[in-house]
Amino acid sequence: MVLGVTFWFLLSSALSVAEPTNDLAASRKAVVYSSCKIPNTAALTFDDGPYKFMTNISDLLVSKGAKGTFFVNGDNYACIYDTKVAARLQYAYSNGHQICSHTWSHPDLQTLSENEIAGEIAQVDIALMKILGVASPFIRPPFGSYNTLVRQVAFQQNKSLVLWDTDSEDSLNATVAQSEGIYDDAISANLSTILALNHETEQTTAQELIGYAVDALQAANYSLVTVAECLGLEPYSFVGQLGQRDTTWFCPEDDDS
């Protein structure tokens, strides 16, 4: 009963902050992280899921004593509430990986109004609470695109923005060899920390690149941790129990199915 009350409180909060304030001029802005803070850490991050390769990536990381961070959409490649998709999300979370928001539908947030930005954030917040029972304080804006308004709305919804300092370019048609070279260059630069962008929707990333990257980073004495761990922060602002499917688990366009 307590969990249920807490869920509906958080749900109401998420929905309420989606309303425009009409007074953002003096608003505080969300913190933007583009690199890790804890020395000798590397955070491998994966955008655009939960996709069919999420489970494989999770298993690979666990087998090598590493953790990853997944920035997920609500309705991009698939609806987050679909049975298989939600199961992947719960699997990765239960295996110790961090789950964060990547917005509901993967828009360029700079092109949206205040209310639209808030809705993109709130819908994923609601989904993560329903499916995982958690509230994430982190969001990655699609394309790394943000402006002052995005930061103001994100702050209102208790979010920090997470970018990256190393892009594998797997979503930009880089070959596996080219992406491996990017990791090699980052390691050769003797960077104190690495915050790397990858995409779990890329088959070659899941099946070839990540295994190489983990081995190379660990050989260079980096600890492969979550974004929260590499920043020295808590991964979630609320942690409850895994959710159970009910009639509210659907994406808006699926309402008439």
Image: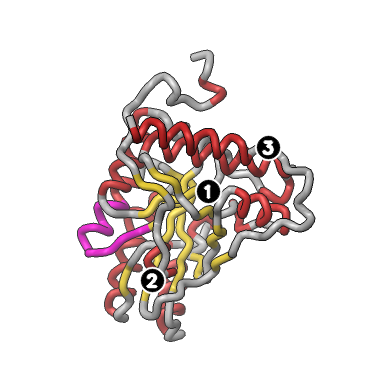
Q: Which residues are magenta?
A: 57-68
User: Foreground: 217 or 202?
Assistant: 217
Q: How many marks?
A: 3
Residue lying at 33% horizontally and 76% vertically, measured from the top left: 222
Give neighbour class at mark 3: few <14, some 14-19, many 20+ (Cα, 10 Å). few
Label 1: element kind = loop
Mark nearer the viewer, 3 or 2:
3
- Real-space Cα separation, disc 1 to disc 2, in angstroms: 20 Å
Q: Circle 2 sits on which residue?
A: 42
| Mark found first going from the N terminus, 3 or 2 | 3
Which amino acid does the dot numbered 2 rest on?
Ala
Q: Amino acid at mark 1?
A: His
Contact flag, marks 1 and 3 (Cβ < 8 Å): no
Q: In this image, 159 relative to 26: left or right?
A: left
Q: Quadrant of the N terminus?
A: top left
- Res 74 seen here: yes
Q: Which residue is mark 3?
A: 19
Q: Residue furthest left?
A: 63
Q: CA distance from mark 3 to mark 2?
A: 37 Å
The image shows residue 224 at horizontal and vertical percentages of 32, 68
Mark 2 crowdedness (10 Å alpha carbons): few <14, some 14-19, many ≥20? many
Q: Residue at x 33, y 74 (%)?
A: 217
Helix, strand or loop under label 2: strand
Residue, disc 1: 102
Judge whether 16 appears above or below 221 on screen.
Answer: above
Q: Is residue 107 above or below residue 145?
A: above
